Amino acid sequence: MPTIEPFVRWAGGKTWLIPYLHKLIDNIHIEHYHEPFLGGAAIFFSLNLSKLSYLSDSNEQLVNTYIQIRDNPKSVINCFLQFKNNEYEYYRIRDNFEPKTSEEAAAQFIYLNQTSYNGLFRVNKQGKYNVPYGFRTNWHYDTRRISLASEKLKNTKISVGDFEINKYKINKHDLVFLDPPYTVSHNNNGFIEYNKNLFSLDDQKRLSRFIDYIKQKNAYYVLTNAAHEEIKKIFTKEGDRIIKLKRNSLIGGRNASREEIFEYIFTNIPQGEDKNE
C-alpha cells in the first residue's frame, strides 16, 4: 500500500522525517518491522511492508483505538459520525460519555484527539482526559482515513506495554524504529518540563541497553531523539552513525511562531549498504 496519512494528531509526530527515513532504509532488506513508541505511527503508515509488524505503546486508550480500527473500522466510523463538532458536544463527550464498547471508546478517542486543543493527550490524577476544546470550527474529518488505516494495519500485532514488550520477537534483518518521548529540551522548547516524569533519563539509558540487544540480534534500529549532549552521551555507540537534522517546529498555541530545532538520528544502518548483502 502507498503512504497514508495518520488518523490521529500526535505531539512530536514524525511525518517530517518520512523522506529522510526512506532514503536511509532504501538499501536494506527488512524482515519484520517493530515500532514500540507508536504515537501517530507516521513512519509505519509510510512504509510498504509485506510481513508481520509489531506495534506497541504504553497508552492503553491509543492501543485500543489501533486495535479497533484494524478489526472493526465500520463500527468505529458509525460511532464517530454520531459526534458533533461544537463546544457543548465536546465537553459532553469528554466528561459524560461512557463508552459501552471498545469501538465506542476508539471513536471517542479519535473525536477528542481531532477537536481538542492542539491534539494533546493529557490526563489528570484520576486518569481523566482533561484537554480543553480546540475551537476547530471549520474542521472536517474524512473517515476514509480510518478505512485506509485499517487496511494498512491488517498484518500487525498490536500490544500495550513498555517498549520492551516485543523484545524477544526481534530477529536478524528486522527494523526497529524508536521515537521515545524527549526527556531533555532541545532549543529550550520545554520538553524537559512536559516529559520528565513520562520518560526519564534512566528510561533513556534502559533504551540504550535495548538497542544493544537489537544489535546483538543483527537487526537494524533507527532512533530519533533530542539534539542534546546528554542524549548524545547515552546513545553514542561504536560503529553506529549519528545524524543531526534541522526542522521547523511550531511552538505554542494561537500566537505560535516557528523556530528551527535540531534532532538526532542514531542508527546502525551503514551508508550505501548493499540490499543483497
Image: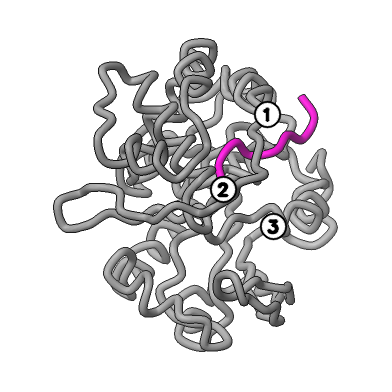
**Viewer-proximal residue among 150 and 266:** 150
The amino acid pointed to by label 1 is: Asp
- Please give the range of residues in magenta: 1-8
Of the two numbered discs 1 and 3 in the rendering, the one whose residue sits closer to the viewer: 1
Q: Which residue is mark 3?
A: 269
Instruction: Please provide percent x and percent y for residue 241.
Output: 67, 71
Q: Which residue is mark 2?
A: 9
Q: Quadrant of residue 157?
A: top left
**Point 82% across, 38% down: residue:** 276
**Viewer-proximal residue among 268 and 138:** 138
Disc 2, SS: loop
Does residue 116 show up magenta in the picture? no
Of the two numbered discs 1 and 2 in the rendering, the one whose residue sits closer to the viewer: 1
Disc 3, SS: loop
**Viewer-proximal residue among 173 and 189:** 189
Farthest residue in the front direction?
88
Q: Which residue is mark 1?
A: 142
In contact (CB < 8 Å): disc 1 and disc 2? no
Q: Quadrant of the N terminus?
A: top right
Instruction: Please provide percent x and percent y for residue 162.
Output: 31, 48
Q: Earlier in the sequence, mark 1 or mark 2?
A: 2
The amino acid pointed to by label 3 is: Ile
Does residue 2 show up magenta in the picture? yes
For disc 1, the neighbor class at 10 Å (few under 14, some 14 to 19, many from 20) is few
Compute the Cα span from label 2 to label 3. Answer: 29 Å
Instruction: Please provide percent x and percent y for residue 228.
Output: 53, 84
Q: Quadrant of residue 7?
A: top right
Compute the Cα span from label 1 to label 3. Answer: 37 Å
**Point 49% across, 73% down: residue:** 235
Query: Residue 90: which numbered mark, if any?
Result: none
